[in-house]
Image (cartoon, helix red, strand yellow):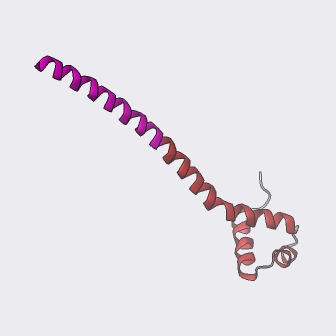
Amino acid sequence: MSKYSPELKAQIIKEVGETKNIVAVAKAHNLNHKTVWSWVNRKRIEPEMASYKKVTELQRKLSALTLENQILKDLLKKTNQAWLSECK
């Protein structure tokens, strides 16, 4: 359980973005600069993590579809060979 509200964190992160000074913002809010730094860093990483998760999910889907495609090609090849042998 966090003792700081998400609204406060967002406000502090916004102030850091405007001032580019983590230490000054932390002092203004009576916070440890390492705490503020971790909030800012976590916020910076969120889009990258979302992107990483999306890429991982797409890779999983591509792998499944590639396997399905290969199975269907093999089945089509066998069906086509059987059909051709029947026509002779």
Q: Nearer the viewer, residue 38 or 14?
A: 38
Percent position of residue 55, x then y: 54, 51
The image quadrant of residue 16 is bottom right
70 left or right, relative to 76:
right
Out of 67 and 55, give the one closest to the viewer.
67
Residue 67 against residue 28 in the figure, above or below:
above
Residue at left offset 50%, top offset 41%: 60
Residue at left offset 42%, top offset 34%: 67
- The prevailing secondary structure element of the residues shown in magenta is helix
Q: Nearer the viewer, residue 53 or 69?
A: 69
- Residue 88 drawn at (x, y percent): 11, 18
- Magenta stretch: residue 73 in it? yes
In the picture shown, does residue 67 fall above or below 46?
A: above
User: What is the magenta range?
Assistant: 61-88
Q: Where's residue 83, x and y in %?
A: 17, 22
The residue located at (53%, 52%) in the rendering is 54
Name which residue lies at 27% across and 29% down.
76
Q: Residue furthest bottom?
A: 19
Which image quarter: residue 28?
bottom right
The correct choice, above or below, for 22 with respect to 86 in the image is below
The tally of labels here is 0
Left or right: 78 in relation to 2: left
Q: What is the residue that sits farthest to the left in this orientation?
A: 87
Foreground of the two, 50 or 9: 50
Where is residue 71 shown, x and y percent of the image?
A: 36, 29
Image quadrant in which you'd find residue 85: top left
